[in-house]
């Protein structure tokens, strides 16, 4: 039997190149987008600004945010695609929480 929904975690490293205000707006934009397609959305911004292990697109620091949510199995692939297309996102990783 196929899963109806599962719990996911998305770690996103946002770019600090454009400043903090546009970055905060982008964090909120993705939170709202996830809420439209998922349930039980939580945003954990405790990681905050960190030095990257290696430069990504000539940036040495990024802002780490973790979103947790529950959704149908097809939504995380769409979210990952949208994150990868956004210029304000350096890296992202979607994982299933068992």
Image: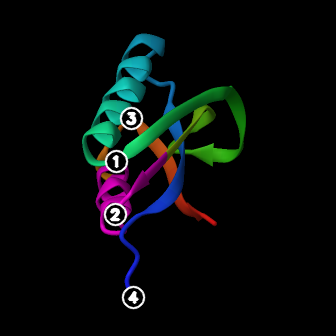
Task: Say which residue appears at 43% left-offset and 18% top-offset.
Answer: 24
Q: Are marks 4 and 1 in contact (CB under 8 Å)?
A: no
Q: Which residue is mark 3?
A: 88
Q: Earlier in the sequence, mark 4 or mark 2?
A: 4
Image quarter hosting the C terminus: bottom right
Q: Quadrant of residue 63?
A: top right
Image quarter hosting the N terminus: bottom left
Mark 3 element type? loop
- Residue extending farthest bottom: 1
Question: CA–CA distance between discs 3 and 4?
Answer: 38 Å
Q: Which residue is mark 2?
A: 72
Mark 1 element type? loop
Q: Nearer the viewer, mark 3 or mark 4?
A: 4
Mark 4 element type? loop
Q: Which residue is mark 4?
A: 1
Residue numbers of the magenta segment? 69-84
Mark 2 element type? loop
Q: Quadrant of residue 33?
A: top left
Question: CA–CA distance between discs 2 and 3?
Answer: 26 Å
Closest to the observer, 41 or 9: 41
Seen in the picture, residue 69 relative to 45 is either above or below; the reply is below
């Amino acid at each position: 039997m196929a899963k109806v929904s599962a719990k996911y975690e998305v770690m996103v490293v946002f770019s600090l190149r454009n400043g903090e205000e546009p970055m905060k707006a982008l964090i909120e934009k993705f939170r709202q987008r996830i809420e439209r397609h998922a349930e039980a959305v939580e945003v954990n911004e405790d990681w905050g600004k960190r030095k990257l292990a290696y430069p990504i697109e000539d940036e040495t620091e990024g802002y780490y945010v973790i979103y947790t949510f529950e959704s149908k199995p097809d939504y995380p692939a769409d979210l990952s695609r949208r994150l990868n297309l956004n210029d304000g996102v350096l890296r992202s990783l979607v994982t299933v929480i068992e």
